[in-house]
Image (tube, rainbow, N blue to C red):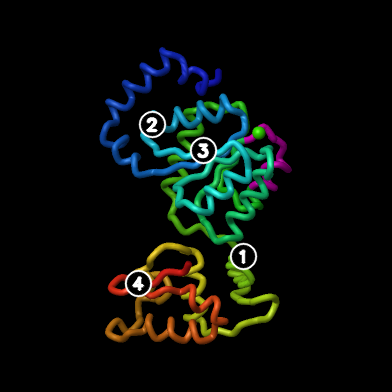
């Protein structure tokens, strides 16, 4: 039985309305969660969007891989639901690009491709979960909630900013294949800013994530290391670490 279809029937709608009243506080909390749906089958796309909206999520949608990728890179989502067989750009390619660009948004593949090989390949591309069509909407929702409970910083092995490439496993940084040398802290700063591209990070955020508990909290340690990091980076990249006065730093 496909719950997804039941949800769109009038009987299903009554059931959902009852659930929302029952979980009012929870549903209100979820309004802050933003989901991207990339699915080319119009009816399924509409059903997913409506089903998620009824559960209190803010939902954006795309019908092809190219548009989906653009949205995924431009915006900040809490979860991305991604079909694999998509026009213009395959869902797996979209997933790889999103991860290469340093975005750690949880990605759930929703696809008719159901072999073990397909699942393994999808997860290796950087997806966090995999659900095979036809699916139950309740299961999808449970999986979305599980993804939302995860800590926000998932790991992508390779982070990339134009020609700057950071291998987080080897902890190496290269620009057009040429290695740049950093101290451990400078490297940590660069990786942290890359993982949070476009987001202003305060000195406290940076200290918490890049330094251990035993740093000298009275010094301007973040500013000093950032200055050194900027010096060692090619100018075009150094410029992209912006100082936001009174707030912190942001890599753009
Ligand atoms: Ca498809």
Tell me: 88 left or right of 149: right
Q: Which residues are magenta?
A: 111-122
**Is residue 208 placed above or below 69 in the rendered structure?**
below
Residue 123 in the image, given as x and y percentages of width and height: 63, 48
Question: Dot 4 corresponds to which residue?
Answer: 244
Question: Dot 3 corresponds to which residue?
Answer: 61
Question: Dot 1 corresponds to which residue?
Answer: 158
Q: Is residue 131 visible?
A: no
Badge 1 crowding class, 10 Å Cα cut-off, few under 14, some 14 to 19, many 20 or more, is: some
Secondary structure of residue under mark 4 = strand
Badge 3 crowding class, 10 Å Cα cut-off, few under 14, some 14 to 19, many 20 or more, is: many
Precedes in sequence: disc 4 or disc 2: 2
Residue at image coords 51%, 71%: 191
Which mark is nearer the camera, 1 or 3?
3
> Is 113 or 117 nearer to us in this picture?
113
**How far apart are labels 1 and 3 at the CA level?**
27 Å
**Is residue 90 placed above or below 240 in the rendered structure?**
above
Precedes in sequence: disc 1 or disc 2: 2
Secondary structure of residue under mark 1 = strand
**How far apart are labels 4 and 2 at the CA level?**
37 Å
Precedes in sequence: disc 4 or disc 1: 1
State how many labels appear. 4
Question: Dot 2 corresponds to which residue?
Answer: 55
């Amino acid at each position: 039985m496909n719950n997804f279809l039941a949800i769109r029937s009038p009987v299903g709608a009554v059931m959902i309305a009852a659930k929302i009243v029952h979980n009012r506080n929870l549903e209100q909390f979820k309004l802050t969660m933003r989901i991207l749906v990339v699915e080319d089958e119009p009816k399924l796309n509409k059903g997913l969007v409506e089903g998620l909206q009824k559960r209190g999520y803010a939902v954006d949608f795309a019908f092809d891989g190219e548009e989906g990728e653009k949205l995924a890179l431009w915006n900040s989502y809490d979860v991305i639901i991604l079909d694999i067989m998509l026009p213009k750009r395959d869902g797996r390619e979209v997933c790889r690009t999103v991860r290469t660009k340093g975005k750690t948004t949880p990605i759930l593949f929703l696809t008719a491709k159901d072999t073990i090989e397909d699942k393994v390949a999808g997860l290796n591309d950087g997806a966090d979960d995999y659900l095979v069509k036809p699916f139950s909407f309740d299961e999808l929702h449970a999986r979305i909630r599980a993804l939302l409970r995860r800590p926000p910083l998932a790991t992508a092995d390779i982070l990339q900013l134009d020609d700057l490439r950071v291998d987080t496993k080897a902890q190496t940084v290269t620009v057009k294949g040429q290695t740049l040398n950093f101290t451990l802290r400078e490297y940590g700063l660069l990786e942290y800013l890359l993982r949070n591209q476009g987001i202003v990070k305060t000195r406290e955020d940076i200290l918490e994530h890049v330094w251990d508990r035993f740093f000298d909290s009275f010094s301007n340690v973040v500013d000093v290391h950032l200055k050194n990091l900027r010096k060692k980076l090619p100018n075009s990249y150094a410029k992209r670490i912006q100082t936001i006065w009174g707030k912190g730093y942001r890599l753009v």
